[in-house]
Every structure is written in C-alpha cells, then in structure tokens.
Amino acid sequence: MLRGVATATSELLAQSKRLETLAANLADADTPGYRADRLDEQTFSSILLDRIDQGSTQVGPIELGPVMSRPSVDLATGPIEQTGRALDVALTGPGFFVVQSPSGPQYTRRGAFQQDASGRLVSLEGWPVLGQNGPIAGAGPLRITDTGQVMSGQQAVGQLQVVGFSTGTTFDRRAGTYLVPTGGGAAQPIANAPLLAGHLEGSNVDLTTTVTDMMAASRSYQAAQKALTTQDAALGTLIEQVNGQ
C-alpha cells in the first residue's frame, strides 16, 4: 500500500515537471532561435541500478514510479523566415553566434541583432556580438552579408564569429535563447559557416506535438492524483481498523 502511495507520488512529480517544461517551450514557440527543452522519463529503480552496477549481473528493476531526467536542450534546427532586416542573420547549418554577456560568453542561434548608440553590433539585450577579433562596431549603419561579414557602408568592420562544440556536448540554458556548455566545454570556430542575411531561424518547438504532449501529461497527472487519493483512503481505513482492534 505504501508502495502504491510512493508510485502515485512519483508519477505526480514527474508529470508536473513535464507540464512545466512543455509550458515553457510553448511560451517560446515564436521566439527566434529558441531551442526546446526535452525530458526523458525513467523509473527510479532503473536509474539506481544503472548507477550502482559495476559490471555484475544486473537485478531486474522493481518499479516504484517514474522520474524525469535533467532537462536537455534539443538542438534540432528551426524554420528559416525572411525578414529583410539588415542586421538579421540565420545559421543554416550547425553552430552558434557568440555574445559577450555580463557573466561571460554565451551562445545562441538567435541572429536578431541591432546597432547601439556607440555603433556596436549588439544582441537585443544590448550585449556585444563577438566577431573573430572581438566586438564589432562601425561609424555608420551596419549590415550583415551572407558570408557573415559586417559592413559599414562599403567597409568591412568585422566577421561574425560562429562556433561549434564536440558531438555529445550538453548545454545549460541561460536567459531565453542563450546556452552555455555543461562543464565549460571548449568552443571550436566554424570556418565559412552557412548563413542567410535578412533571415531569422525560428523556434524548433513543434506546436502540435507540444500541445498533444501537454494533454497526455495532464491526463497522466489526473490519473496519478486519483490513484493517490484512493491509496490514501485505503491506508486511512487500514489504520482505523488496526486502531480499533
């Protein structure tokens, strides 16, 4: 009976986390360059046995309810849309743009840049966008070409820095579309990264799938809630019977 309470509680916590993650993805479905968070569901016992197993014959799992993994960032590409803005640019291959945030370099696929009052190329937050030789600035209006060159009039004032990471690198999310490699993995420059000036890459959140997953998670949460209520009532009845003896 206590196992039933533990299982139902675990399911409630897991589905609550799934709903929270899906809701966050849905909120950023229209944010250029946003990368969705993904959760993997596993049973607690499977995770525990996997961690303690050191090559010996593994004991079969005892199901005590699911738990959610740490959220991982889905790096699948999003749709490309034309905007016509001189400082919009989309990556059509792997990689990230680099911005200098107050806490250090951060990486993003959101190529919606602007020029500040000092002539610097900056993100929407006002953080400098890094070129191959550092921050980029020009005396006149800036524009970005398909090769990643930043032009001020007819003069090239910088080349956008595009970087990648080794296969299997995981990322921690910072504000909105910004990511940093878990554990501080080293960024590697990408030469001749494929770009489209005057375009933006959209969010990779699939609205239909996300809404469907939210409905399924909501139903699972309701079922676990009902199971927990039933188990709690049965446990209360058992306690009353024991006390009455």
Image: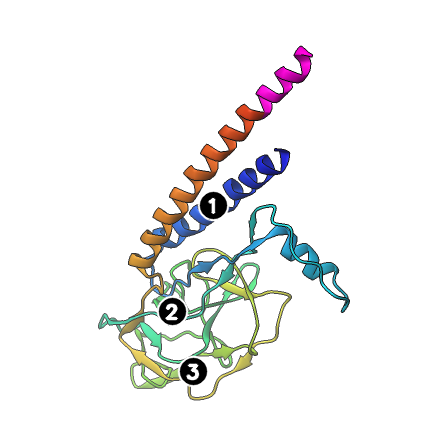
Name the residue: 41% across, 74% down: 137
Q: Nearer the viewer, mark 1 or mark 2?
A: 1
- Position in image of residue 151 (x %, y %): 34, 81
Q: CA distance from mark 2 to mark 3?
A: 15 Å
Which residue is identified by label 2?
A: 119
Position of the C terminus by quadrant? top right
Q: CA distance from mark 3 to mark 1?
A: 45 Å
- Position in image of residue 121 (x %, y %): 39, 70
Mark 1 or 2, nearer chain start:
1
The answer to which of 110 and 154 lies nearer the viewer is 110
| In this picture, residue 97 sits left or right of residue 239 | left
Instruction: Residue 159: give its label.
Output: 3
The answer to which of 231 and 159 lies nearer the viewer is 231
Residues rendered magenta in the picture: 235-245
> Are the residues at dot 1 and dot 2 in contact (C-beta closer than 8 Å)?
no
**Element at label 2:** loop
